[in-house]
């Protein structure tokens, strides 16, 4: 009966028969990866063959158009531009009863958190990007001079998608500036906006892009072209963010001029052809055009902006979600905005471009039309219940596959990271509207497991496109692998730099009212200047470790005006915790904790000295893959609280629990002290550096691995002290004259063993009774500072030995010094011990005085004329020796010049900021 009602309502809304189609069989052109490879190829036959299937069958949008907007026009005026404009001047009003976003300007991440580290790595990358290179193609298109060098990859001058990353850069830099107030970044991003403004002024029509408008001629003529509106959306969104976060009025002016230009283009298509022709052209990706236009309307109130936003709401796709069609089979996810780039493909039905779900959500916020709330809710529910991996991410090779059939999709090309970026946006909207815990839990899962890991450690500008899910795969071994700083610029690089610029935007949400409320949904070390609550809140989260199964969070408070007003803090109690061992206290007084999946509400007038503490138990649990076929029921993920665990093994991917009653019985936590026992051993040979490596349970010397690769794991060992009283390895002196065993990091529980004189070393399961796994660490036989040699514990005078002048793959053996005829024996038996492959420490005593001076989190740089040594100063007396400079001194700085003929001479001292490290001197500038 319910299905009949749905069909009746659908017929009333849409006036169409069951034969109407919305989708089309997709072609490979829907993949950005494939499109880039095709357009970069010189194979014209291949191109001709692929583009022969471009827009195979027009979609029937007229059947769905009445949903968008909801039957506001008379039948005879259905596609009249003038009537549409007239009727949309008074849109529905939003209820506005949503949680309010907290400004990034008021949130600061704590330098001790991994989130701050990720943000800082991203900031370093943004500062590395060159203004002239970013705007090179824009200037070329505008006919301006092009200093510098164009970037490569998807920003190359011959790539049809060029300019998209620049739009992302504008958004990311605006958000990063709000998050850090970095002065250098502010100047750099303002320079980009000014350069783009010059391009727009030069062209004179309002058009602004890195490619000529001819691409839109092809778009409107339904000819092959790579998503020009996708790039325009990024540029519009970036400029709008520059206005929103950085108060750049010039950027808003540019946006409005651009939108006027495209308003006229769309109007001409509808006037000269039909609205159907416009919708047919939208079969090519259009990004989140509707989303950015709804946001613009919320700022300007200009009905033209609302009309144009509606016209980028593609009726048939949103219509499918409106009537809750449950299939996303063969759906294009690469929604670098799920909003604008999600394409619904049902097998054997027509291809079409989807419209932004995120834009539909913004339409709900602007107009209050509940249909669009339902669209966002249904979309999130179906993706999260049928198409998501344990990471919170989704997609396989940039598409969605059959629902609840994910076991067949595990490969290297899973979880496009920009799709995760957009699903976070969808869930964020839904949480603000509903306060439902499920959306907050999802946000934590996807951010923790699907976003934070797309950077390669702390290397600026090195990120991934896909997050592989296949057993035995790694980030570096996917089709795309790790990107590069200046020659990649995939879609996921754009969303990547945005993700790491706004990590503070979903920790806190505000509820307005006479007694303000604050929802804290992410436990991330940070501080919030809560304006309406009139307090500064500091959140400190202890690092989570396996050996201490609790999440511990402490909140402290500092009223902004002496005493704050009464307010309510709502603390998320996640679904992954349990009450056994959970505690909450306010100034040491216990609070009752509600069931997981609820909020703990604390109302009071907060004052200095208040301390709110939360302790939540963390336990291991499993989750089955989203696949309803019984033969795949055993494929499960293992999670530790919100953290998805990744197993490391040499080849057997099946976890055999045996008779263990629970996961905690078969999985043992690793003591925190193990982190202080990791080492690598390196050696120079020829012009290369090699490291001791576990190569399939044989020990070889391999070239120093690149950071972030499997080879780093294979070249890392844990020092297991034969004397249990030793544990830490902070420097070379901690291991000299100690008996140790070496456990390969990638084979925990196994040990490096000797197999006799002049025999190769190997790896076995456990320590042998004959002492063949024991080594005695001694100072390097080569006599050099910082080197060690590894002597056999059972055969005195015999050492791990490599030889000299060898190549990668050299097998390591146990060789004895006595009787050796090799003049390079001492060199071949000496290694540099590295505490970490990425560590830059120095444990040589003669360099103990080389120290850094910090002021809080800031590293201070000294300025001197020639002597760089600080004499006779102890750590306790630094403040007595280093005097703070008053800001008033900046007003007393002068430079004296004198002009003679064609030269100007300057007397310069350190106050001129010349950057010269020399003593007082003169320089001359001649013209």
Image (spheres, rainbow, N blue to C red):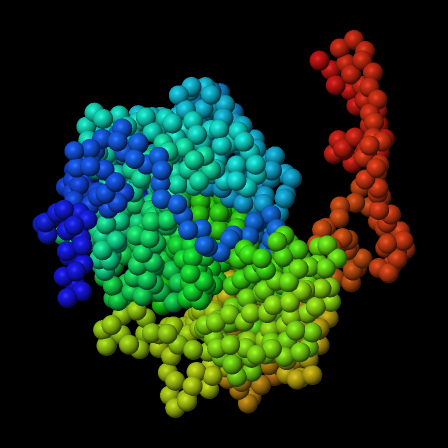
Rendered image quadrant of residue 175: top right
Does residue 121 appear anywhere in the picture? Answer: no
Image point 54% across, 31% down: which residue?
249
Residue 917 relative to residue 166: left or right = right
Q: Where in the figure is residue 628, as x and y percent of width and height?
A: 24, 72
Front one among 850 and 743? 850
Residue 110 relative to residue 215: left or right = right
Q: Where in the figure is residue 85, as x and y percent of width and height?
A: 30, 32
Front one among 652 and 133? 133
Q: In the rendered view, would you say 677 is above or below 867?
A: below
Question: Which quadrant does the N terminus fall into?
Answer: bottom left
Image point 27% across, 28% down: which residue?
82
Residue 768 relative to residue 89: left or right = right
Q: Where in the figure is residue 567, as x and y percent of width and height?
A: 61, 62
Q: Where in the figure is residue 867, as x and y percent of width and height?
A: 85, 43
Image point 34% across, 29% down: which residue?
262
Image point 72% across, 50% down: which residue?
859
Question: Which quadrant does the C terminus fall into?
Answer: top right
Does residue 283 appear anywhere in the picture? Answer: yes
């Amino acid at each position: 009966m319910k299905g009949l009602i749905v069909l009746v309502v659908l017929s009333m809304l849409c006036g169409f028969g069951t034969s109407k189609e919305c989708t089309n069989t997709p072609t490979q052109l829907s993949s950005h990866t494939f499109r880039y490879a095709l357009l970069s190829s010189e194979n014209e036959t291949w191109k001709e063959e692929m583009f022969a299937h471009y827009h195979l069958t027009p979609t029937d949008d007229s059947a769905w158009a009445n949903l968008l907007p909801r039957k506001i026009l008379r039948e005879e005026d259905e596609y009249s531009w003038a009537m549409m404009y007239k009727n949309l001047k008074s849109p529905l009003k939003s209820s506005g009863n949503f949680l309010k976003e907290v400004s990034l300007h008021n949130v600061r991440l704590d330098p001790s958190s991994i989130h701050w580290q990720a943000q800082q790595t991203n900031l370093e990358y943004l500062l590395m990007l060159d203004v002239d290179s970013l705007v090179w193609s824009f200037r070329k298109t505008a006919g301006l001079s092009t200093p510098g060098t164009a970037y490569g990859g998807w920003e190359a001058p011959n790539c049809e998608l060029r300019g998209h990353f620049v739009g992302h850069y504008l958004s990311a830099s605006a958000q990063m500036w709000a998050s850090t107030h970095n002065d250098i970044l502010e100047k750099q991003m303002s320079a980009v906006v000014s350069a783009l403004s010059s391009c727009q002024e030069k062209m004179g029509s309002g058009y602004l892009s890195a490619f000529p408008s001819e691409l839109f001629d092809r778009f409107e003529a339904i000819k092959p072209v790579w998503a020009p509106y996708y790039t325009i959306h990024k540029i519009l969104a970036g400029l709008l963010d520059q206005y929103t976060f950085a108060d750049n009025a010039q950027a808003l002016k540019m946006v409005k001029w651009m939108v006027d230009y495209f308003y006229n283009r769309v109007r001409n298509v509808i006037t000269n052809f039909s609205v159907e022709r416009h919708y047919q052209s939208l079969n090519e990706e259009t990004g989140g055009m509707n989303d950015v236009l709804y946001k613009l309307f919320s700022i300007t109130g200009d009905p033209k902006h609302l009309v144009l936003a509606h016209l980028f709401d593609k009726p048939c796709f949103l219509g499918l979600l409106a009537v809750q069609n449950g299939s996303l089979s063969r759906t294009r996810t690469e929604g670098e905005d799920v909003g604008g780039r999600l394409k619904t493909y049902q097998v054997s039905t027509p291809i079409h471009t989807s419209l932004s779900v995120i834009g539909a959500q913004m339409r709900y916020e602007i107009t209050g039309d509940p249909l669009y709330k339902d669209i966002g809710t249904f979309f999130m529910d179906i993706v999260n219940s049928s198409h998501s991996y344990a990471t919170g991410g989704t997609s396989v090779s940039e598409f969605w596959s059959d629902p609840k059939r994910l076991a067949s999709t595990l490969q290297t090309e899973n979880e496009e990271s920009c799709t995760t970026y957009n699903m976070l946006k969808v869930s964020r909207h839904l949480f603000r509207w509903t306060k439902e815990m499920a959306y907050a839990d999802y946000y934590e899962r996807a951010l923790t497991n699907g976003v934070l890991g797309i950077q390669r450690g702390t290397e600026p500008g090195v990120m991934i496109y896909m997050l592989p899910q296949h057993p035995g795969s790694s980030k570096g071994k996917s089709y795309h692998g790790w990107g590069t700083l200046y020659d990649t610029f995939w879609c996921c690089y754009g969303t990547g730099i945005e993700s790491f610029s706004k990590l503070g935007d979903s920790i806190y949400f505000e509820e307005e009212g006479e007694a303000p409320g604050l929802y804290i949904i992410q436990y991330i070390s940070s501080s919030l200047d809560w304006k309406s609550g009139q307090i500064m809140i500091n959140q400190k989260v202890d690092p989570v470790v396996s050996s201490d199964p609790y999440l511990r969070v402490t909140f402290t408070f500092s009223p902004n005006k002496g005493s704050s007003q009464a307010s309510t803090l709502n603390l998320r109690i996640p679904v992954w915790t349990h009450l056994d061992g959970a505690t909450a206290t306010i100034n040491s007084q216990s609070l009752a904790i509600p069931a997981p999946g609820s909020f703990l509400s604390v109302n009071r007038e907060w004052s200095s000295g208040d301390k709110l503490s939360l302790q939540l138990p963390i336990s291991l649990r499993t989750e089955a893959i989203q696949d309803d076929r019984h033969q795949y029921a055993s494929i499960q993920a293992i999670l530790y609280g919100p953290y998805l665990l990744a197993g490391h093994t040499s080849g057997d991917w099946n976890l055999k629990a045996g008779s263990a009653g629970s996961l905690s019985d078969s999985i043992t936590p690793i003591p925190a002290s193990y982190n202080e026992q990791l080492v690598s051993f390196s050696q120079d040979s020829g012009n290369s550096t090699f490291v001791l490596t576990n190569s399939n349970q044989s020990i070889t010397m391999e070239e120093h691995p690149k950071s972030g690769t499997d080879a780093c794991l294979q070249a890392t060992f844990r020092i297991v002290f034969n004397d249990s009283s030793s544990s830490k390895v902070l420097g070379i002196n901690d291991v000299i004259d100690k008996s140790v065993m070496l456990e390969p990091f990638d084979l925990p529980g196994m040990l490096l063993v000797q197999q006799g004189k002049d025999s190769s070393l190997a790896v076995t399961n456990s320590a042998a009774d004959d002492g063949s796994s024991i080594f005695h660490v001694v100072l390097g036989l080569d006599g050099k500072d910082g080197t060690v040699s590894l002597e056999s514990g059972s055969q005195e005078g015999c050492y791990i030995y490599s030889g000299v002048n060898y190549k990668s793959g050299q097998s390591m053996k146990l060789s004895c010094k006595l009787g050796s005829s090799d003049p390079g024996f001492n060199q071949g038996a000496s290694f540099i011990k590295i505490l970490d492959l990425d560590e830059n420490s120095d444990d040589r005593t003669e360099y103990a005085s080389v120290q850094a001076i910090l002021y809080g989190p800031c590293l201070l740089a000294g300025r001197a004329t020639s002597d760089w040594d600080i004499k006779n100063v102890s750590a306790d007396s630094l403040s007595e020796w280093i005097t703070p400079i008053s800001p008033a001194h900046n007003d007393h700085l002068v430079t004296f010049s004198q002009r003679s003929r064609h030269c100007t001479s300057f007397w310069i001292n350190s106050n001129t900021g010349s950057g010269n490290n020399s003593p007082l001197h003169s320089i001359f500038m001649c013209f």
